[in-house]
Every structure is written in structure tokens, then in C-alpha cells.
Image: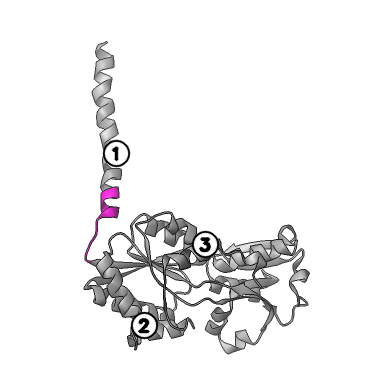
Amino acid sequence: MYKSRLKQPLLWVLALVLFVPHLALAQAQTQCTDTLRLTVSTVKRSEDYLSVIKPFLATMAESLGKKPQLFFTDGWSASVHGFSQNSADLVLVPQSMLNVVHAKPELRPVIRTPGARVLLITEKSSTIRSMEQLRDKKVGTVRDSTEAMIAQQRLSQAGLLEAVELSSVVSPSDVYMGLFQDRFDAAFVIGESMDWLQPTFREKLVQVAEMGRTNGLFLYAGSCVSDAQLKTLEQALLSNPVDERVTRFIEHFNFGRFVAISPGDVEKALKQDFSSDQ
């Protein structure tokens, strides 16, 4: 009996030792600070990319009187998951990941970018000139991306989903690299991303088909951004004329202008069926 009583306090101590660090971590994750944290999926880490993303974040931080802080992740899933755990204040969300953030009412849409064309491309030296010729081919696309979602729906509509080997990579840069290194026979990409390529590489590619259009990227704000701050952000990003640093960010990705967003826009994007969209 004495040993049994002795074990109980020891178990409580062990439980506290194991639980307290997790409790502290949870508190740290939900603590709001004077820093505006933006989570970005690794699109490309070149100096050219950073030269537009950092000033863009600085503009938003200045409008809220906060310090900017940039976080890179290795894909959309990691970016959205970290954001949903309140480890970031702002995140760019592709249409394919909207269902994750939509389930959390404390995460609110701010603005979005216009939609982009999703293309099926290959090298000019390839014999592939139609989607039907993808049978038994290896096709690259970005993991968890809207273009991957559209590609799967189009392939399913054509009865080719089981006949094509879809290979998911982290970023558009990896898709193009795999194509040029002959690891992929073709690729599904956002048309605007081809503008990032050097002309010598772009000239080696050919568009096989246009698969549809996305609803754009959605900028979401977390629970540490108040309703008043949300309005300030919207005004800063939708003002006319827009801050030069915001314009540089938009032009770099060929987004066009940012557009206002409503809950109805999100609902429509969530329900859109690309398999029947012409």
C-alpha cells in the first residue's frame, strides 16, 4: 500500500513535467505581439523575390504600426497549418487550401489577387501536343496548389487520372527544373509564373492546353489582427494610387491589382467545380 501511495505523487509530478512545456508553447503561440508576421510558401528565394516581398510586408506593417517579420515554409500546407496554429498574422492562401482556413472563423479574408491561367506545358522538343497524350506520362505540379487541383479534375473528366503519374514538388521553380532535367514529360503551371523564367529557358517551352483559371491567392488575417486593423490593411492595399512598394509586389507576379473580397467570394471559390468549367 505504501508503494502504491508513493507512486501517485510521482505520477502527478511526471504529468506536470510533461504537460507544462506544451502549455507554455500553446500560450506562446496564441500571444499577440507588436510584430506583423507574414507566412510565405517557398516560391523562389532569389534576391529578386525578397526585394519585393520584404517591402510589401513593410508597407502592411507600417499601416498597422507593427514590426514586419517574414517566415518561409516548404509548401502551402505548412504555411496554412502554421497560420491556423496562430504562429503568423497574415498568409497568402491558394484556392486549393481555402477549406482549411475556412473552418476557422477567427481567420478572415482581407483581399485577393485576380485569377490566373493554369496551363499544361512541355518542352518544344516533346511530342506531346494534347492532354490526351499524357497517358503513361509523368507530369509535374506544385503540391497542394490550385493548379494541381484543376489538373486532377481535368484529368478525371478526360478519364486519364489513373493513367497519368502526377508528381508533386514544393515550388514552381522545382516544376520547371524537373521539366528541363527530363524528370517530367510535361507540367501543370500558373501561366504567369513563366514570366519569371529567363528568356532562353522560356523559349524552350510550348503551351499544350489551357486548363482553366484560378480564383487567385487570398490574403487572410489571423486572430491577432483586429477588425479595425483589418480595415486599415484593406485601405492600404486597395487605395488609389497604391503604395509603390505594393505596386512592385503586384507587378513582379503579374497579379494585376488587388481586389476586395466578401464571404460570398470565398464560398463561391470553395464550391467551384473546375471539371465542368470551360
Identify residue for label 3.
270
The span picked out in magenta is 26-34
> Are dots 3 and 1 in contact, CB under 8 Å?
no
Classify 186 as above or below 84.
Answer: below
Vertically, is 259 above or below 84? below
Q: Image point 44% across, 58% down: which residue?
A: 102
Q: What mark, if any, has residue 246 been given in the picture? A: 2
* Residue holding disc 1: 19
Could you tell me how far apart the alpha carbons at marks 3 and 2 are, in whole angstroms?
Answer: 27 Å
Mark positioned earlier in the residue sequence (3 or 2): 2
Query: In whole angstroms, how far apart are the C-alphas of marks 3 and 1?
Result: 38 Å
CB atoms at circles 3 and 2 under 8 Å apart? no
Q: Position of residue 159 (x, y in %)?
A: 75, 61
- Vertically, is 40 above or below 49? above
If the image is split into quadrants, where does the N terminus sit? top left
Q: Position of residue 254 (x, y in %)?
A: 49, 83
Identify the residue shown where x is 78% and y is 77%: 127
Camera-side mark, 1 or 2: 2
Classify mark 1: helix, strand or loop: helix
84 and 121: which is toward the camera: 84
Q: Of the residues shown, which amino acid type is indicated by label 1?
A: Phe
State whether residue 83 appears in this view: yes
Q: Amino acid at mark 3?
A: Leu
From the top left corner, tell me how far across and down residue 23 is, in percent. Answer: 27, 44
Q: Is residue 28 magenta?
A: yes
Image point 36% across, 82% down: which residue? 246
The disc, 3 or 1, on the residue closer to the chain's N-terminal end is 1
Q: Is residue 239 part of the magenta span, yes or no? A: no
Whether residue 75 is visible, yes or no, is no
Nearest to viewer (mark 3 / mark 1): 3
Please rate how many residues cluster around mark 1, counting C-alpha atoms within 10 Å: few if below 14, some from 14 to 19, many from 20: few
